[in-house]
Image (tube, grey):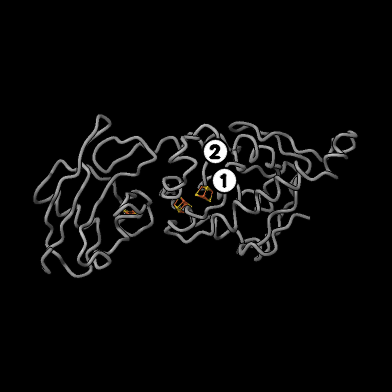
């Protein structure tokens, strides 16, 4: 590579297969990978397919694998690749539509399987929302649904467990719902069974690639695992359930779709991010 240009190796193909093709791109100070892809589109390969929207790392559209690492193309500066070729490939975990564009619709199917935010019907009015509650909901709300965490998660990527595990993005959604003081559903059974949280072995790869720096494993998955373990694998609770005394406390199933009845009881919301005070009471 000369000082004046970068060598890009961009995947070109579709569901039937494809290959990397080489493109030389003139270097411009401050350039990001998405700029280079747009330059290639404009000057060499007008039919190169790429999904993008905001170019500000906020829409989550331009996810790809850059030199093997899941990243947002619009947030990846070319200065990081001085002296290197730049390989750009579509996300591996999802089916390819064309070139860099993948079909991420599976994620929206999963989303629909999570019962929506459900306040109690007899919610006191006005409801007092404390600043502490607002603050701790901030982290999971930052998710831009780029699905880079889903892409890197080996449970989905390498083991094809897409029917068994919802993936890290949706553990973050469960974290949000579990921490929200107005959500009335007890979701522990759903997190264990439908969500498949037990399949996560806390490698933290998802957390490392998240462009919003959400502590996916520390603040979502580990607390959810602890709650599931407390509820279903604690021998004292098991004994109480076996006696039939815990009927009222046992959570109902997290029902599919909308129209879910509010539950009379739910566990205390998860505590604030940081993973320090998350032990369920
Ligand atoms: S920590 Fe869990 S969810 Fe995250 S990448 Fe590893 S296995 Fe997947
Ligand atoms: S949790 Fe992070 S990596 Fe996963 S979809 Fe949301 S923003 Fe993207
Ligand atoms: S174009 Fe929106 S996140 Fe990259």
Q: Are marks 1 and 2 in contact (CB under 8 Å)?
A: yes
The location of residue 241, given as percent across then percent down, is 85, 37
Q: Quadrant of the C terminus?
A: bottom right
Foreground tag (1 vs 2)? 1
Task: Find out if the beta carbon at label 1 lies less than 8 Å from the nearest ligand 1 atom.
Answer: yes
Label at residue 165:
2
Residue drawn 51% across the image and 59% down it: 214
Marks 1 and 2, how far apart at CA: 8 Å
Identify the image quadrant of residue 260: top right
Residue drawn 45% across the image and 59% down it: 212
The location of residue 21, given as percent across then percent down, is 15, 45
Residue drawn 61% across the image and 37% down it: 115
Q: Nearer the viewer, residue 136 or 1?
A: 1
Badge 2: how crowded within 10 Å, few (<14), some, or many (20+)?
many
**Could you tell me which secondary element the residue under label 1 belongs to?**
loop
Task: Find out if the beta carbon at label 2 lies less than 8 Å from the nearest ligand 1 atom.
Answer: yes
The location of residue 22, given as percent across then percent down, is 14, 49
Q: Quadrant of the N terminus?
A: bottom left
Relative side of 264 to 179, left or right: right
Q: Is residue 199 above or below residue 85?
A: above
Q: Which residue is mark 1?
A: 200
Task: Report the label total.
Answer: 2
Q: Quadrant of ligand 3?
A: bottom left
The location of residue 59, given as percent across then percent down, is 37, 52
Badge 1: how crowded within 10 Å, few (<14), some, or many (20+)?
some
Residue drawn 10% across the image and 66% down it: 2
Identify the image quadrant of residue 94: top left
Relative side of 264 to 271, left or right: right
Q: Nearer the viewer, residue 111 or 65?
A: 65
**Could you tell me which secondary element the residue under label 2 belongs to?**
loop
């Amino acid at each position: 590579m000369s000082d004046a240009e970068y060598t890009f190796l961009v995947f070109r193909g579709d569901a039937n297969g494809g290959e990397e093709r080489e493109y030389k791109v003139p270097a411009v100070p401050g350039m990001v990978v998405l700029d280079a892809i747009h330059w290639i589109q404009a000057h060499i390969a007008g039919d190169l397919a790429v999904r993008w929207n905001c170019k500000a790392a906020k829409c989550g559209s331009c996810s790809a694998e850059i030199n093997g690492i899941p990243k947002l193309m619009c947030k990846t500066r070319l200065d990081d690749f001085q002296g290197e070729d730049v390989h750009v490939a579509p996300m591996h975990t999802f089916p390819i539509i064309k070139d860099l564009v993948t079909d991420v619709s599976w994620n929206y199917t999963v989303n629909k399987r999570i019962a929506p935010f459900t306040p109690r019907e007899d919610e006191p009015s006005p409801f007092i929302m404390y600043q502490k509650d607002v603050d701790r909901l901030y982290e999971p709300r930052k998710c831009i649904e780029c699905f880079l965490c889903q892409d890197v998660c080996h449970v989905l990527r390498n083991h094809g467990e897409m029917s068994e595990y919802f993936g890290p993005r949706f553990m973050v959604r469960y974290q949000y719902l579990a921490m929200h003081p107005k959500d009335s559903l007890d979701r522990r059974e759903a997190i264990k069974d439908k969500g498949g949280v037990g399949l996560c072995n806390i490698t933290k790869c998802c957390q490392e690639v998240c462009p919003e720096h959400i502590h996916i494993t520390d603040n979502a998955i580990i607390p959810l695992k602890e709650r599931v373990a407390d509820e279903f694998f604690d021998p004292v609770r098991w004994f109480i359930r076996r006696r039939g005394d815990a009927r009222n406390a046992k959570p109902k199933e997290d029902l599919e779709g909308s129209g879910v009845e509010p539950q009379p009881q739910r566990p205390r919301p998860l505590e604030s991010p940081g993973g320090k005070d998350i032990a369920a009471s």
